[in-house]
Image: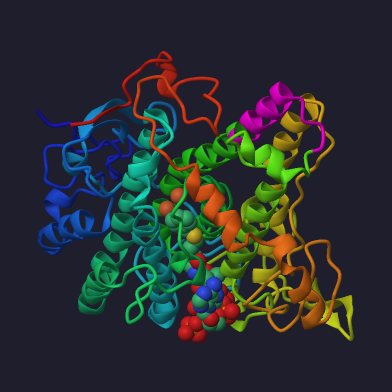
Amino acid sequence: MSDLTEDVLGETVVEINYDELIPNNVDLMNDKQLKKALESWQPKYVDWWNEAGPVNTKDFEVYLRTAVGVDPKGWAKFGHVKMPDYRWGILLAPKEEGRTIPFGKHKGEPVWQEVPGEYRALLRRLIIIQGDTEPASVEQQRILSATAPSLYDMRNLFQVNVEEGRHLWAMVYLLVKYFGREGRQDAEGMLERRSADEDKPRILGAFNEATDDWLSFFMFTYFTDRDGKMQLASLAESGFDPLSRTCRFMLTEEAHHMFVGETGVGRVIQRTCEAMEEAGITNVNDIEAVRKLGVIDLPTLQKKINFHVSVTSDLFGAEVSTNGASAFIAGIKGRFNETKIDDDHQLNDDNYTVTRAVDGKLVDVEETAHNAINSRLLDDYHDDAAGGLGRWNKVIKRAGFDFKLTLPYKGFSRKIGTFSEDFITPDAQVVTEAEWNAKKDEWLCTDSDNAFIQSLMVPCKEKGKYAGWIAAPRVGINNQPEDFEYVKLF
Ligand code: BYC
Ligand code: FE
Ligand code: FE
């Protein structure tokens, strides 16, 4: 049996062929060289997964969704899968006939199906950076299954992990298919670097931070996977069509990762509010009293938000960047929602306002729109991230507590870019280094905050049951009943 069929245009293979070692909709069967290169990379990938992926999960059967098509309605099939038997595939969104480069100096020209020579280095670098984050996140999350607060959450973790693994496949496909011998070497490099390794760390800062408790995991999937969304959306606009198509399909998976984060944090907040209500606590800042209930106090949640927003903001690079300008002008990386923006998409005479700290004050400075591409994406990210906070705050308000979670100012605790030398508070005050250090423990988790969170990380493996610090989800995955066995542990 073969699922391989051609679409009406007879050109793009849109169905996925699961008969091959590597499920794909890129007609791998008829591209001998690519097939050979990927089949030689595949066992190394599996070795990497076994060594650096989720610990002690070899025999688990997990209720996973697997992509069976690239049609947005109905691409997923659900079923229990033994983790190492998961089929990582190469899936691109369908080709859009007649697509033209949507922005930059080549705007309006037909999109590239091959790498344009003059942009080869630029493209390769972006694909490597994108690819590197994917296995990095799996490595960061590898120990979490041991302390999962429920089978439902454990399943969500694994779903995110296998899809991040697939995202690596997506970038490796591009490297191997379009960048020859160098690309094949880059593909090897993806499996050699390790998150937080002293000698061979992952490329970007946030991907070397620890994600060793479940609150960090939920914050990561809400805030850092959202950088994934913004970056992939910008790359989905690319004039290099294979990159665009790859990223468009990746974005459909990204939505679930952020759902896991948003609902995860929301359930933590809900449980905390319930516990405070039951205990008759009205002062949400009475951290001692709240922690005695075995739930995470709201001020600590705010500190976690502050941390994850600041390290994720660094992922946007310097606000003012000639790299960002080059990628935009070349038509390689656009803005968020580029094609929906109503302007000339070239921005040759446009400016963008970038904020800097000057003499103890925040001031707005006009930069060329090209140089400020990263700054704009960071601003779009902060707007996008605000939505979930609004919904989290509703949970707190509905429970009758007077407390509001906020996004820290974009300049807070930055290591990269315009604010990297400054000391800025979460509410956007420029202060001295001494003032900042004196207050730091009010804004970011201390060792004792982290130790408290860790103390709650006791696994809960009973069907339909949840650890005491987190509420049950409102609905099951794929509408499964409450006591569904999301992971069969062996
Ligand atoms: N840490 O001009 P600059 C995801 C480097 S997340 C360390 O400021 P540029 C996911 C930079 O590489 C999405 N180094 O920045 C989420 C450059 O080095 P070189 C990932 C950093 O290039 C969750 C130098 O500093 N995708 O998918 O304009 C789970 C100067 O760079 C950092 C992408 O990022 C940092 N934070 O923009 C799983 C998209 N920031 O080359 C997955 C592809 C900068 O001079 N990448 N540097 O040695 C890009 O678009 C750009 O490379 C960046 C940086 C936006 C990251
Ligand atoms: Fe990803
Ligand atoms: Fe993701």
Rendered residue at 27%/54% (across/down): 53
Q: Is residue 316 above or below residue 155?
A: below
Quadrant position of residue 133: bottom left
Image position of 13 (left or right of 405)? left
Q: Quadrant of the C terminus?
A: top left
- 275 part of magenta stretch: yes
Mark yes or no: residue 25 visible.
yes
Task: Give the residue displayed 77% in from the left and 49% down from the top.
Answer: 406
Percent coordinates x, y for residue 429 in the rendering? 86, 70
Query: 267 and 220: which one is in front?
Result: 267
Residue at x-position 44% and y-position 68%: 208
User: Could you say which is closer to the camera, residue 4 or residue 456?
Assistant: 456
Hey, which quadrant is residue 394 in on the image?
top right
Res 387 seen here = no
What span is colored magenta in the figure? 268-283
> For this rendering, which residue is in front, 172 or 194?
194
Q: Position of residue 236 (x, y in %)?
A: 50, 55
Image location of residue 4, percent across then percent down: 19, 35
